Image (tube, grey):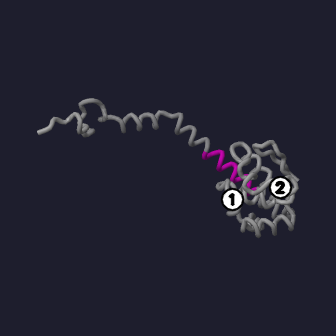
Amino acid sequence: MKTFNDNAGRTWSVSLNIDAIKRVRALATVDLLEAVGGKVIDRLVDDPVLLCDVLYAVCKAEADAKNVSDEAFGRAISGDAIDAATTALLEELVDFFPQAKRRILGKVVGKIKALQARVLEVAELRLDGPELENAMAEALTGFGPGSGSLPESPESTPAP
């Protein structure tokens, strides 16, 4: 069983078993058993709203005991809580499967995490590099005073 904390300071237990998988199917219309193919994991990682719906279904009994509605649960999941919840769910999902599938799913999760890290690294390099600033400066060339690139305002145009 994995845990994560939401932004309201509540700790949630993520425990996947057949009952939880069925509840996710019913409430979030997601089949976590399709995770071995990787598409479900991609969807969960890329869509925090879907992730929250799945987590709420997994944690439904605990949410009911804490009198936390679906909406209140969702309001408390943002920022770093999304990362913590994603990690808890994915690790629990890997642990749910038997050894052979667990090994494959572990590799899928590892590849997705490595790809995400690389995408963020490339984005940071592009934002920190001179190319973006140069492109912005080039785009702004010609918008200076007297360039004729912008039409004059009606107030500055003399009446005929």
Q: Position of residue 75 (x, y in %)?
A: 71, 49
Q: Which residues are magenta?
A: 107-119
Name the front one of labels 2 and 1. Answer: 2
- In the rendered structure, does residue 108 fall within the stretch colored magenta? yes
**The residue tagged with tag 1: helix, strand or loop?**
helix
Say what amino acid the circle numbered 2 marks: Ala
Q: Which residue is mark 2?
A: 63
Position of 159 with respect to 7 (left or right) is left
Position of 24 with respect to 119 (left or right) is right
**The residue tagged with tag 2: helix, strand or loop?**
helix
Q: Which mark identifies residue 3? A: none
In this view, the residue in front, 72 or 82, is: 72
Which residue does the image show at 69% across and 43% down from the upper left?
A: 79
Residue sitting at the far top? 145
Say what amino acid the circle numbered 1 marks: Leu
Q: Position of residue 93 (x, y in %)?
A: 80, 59
Q: Which residue is mark 1?
A: 50
Q: Position of residue 46 (x, y in %)?
A: 65, 55
Rendering quarter of residue 25: bottom right
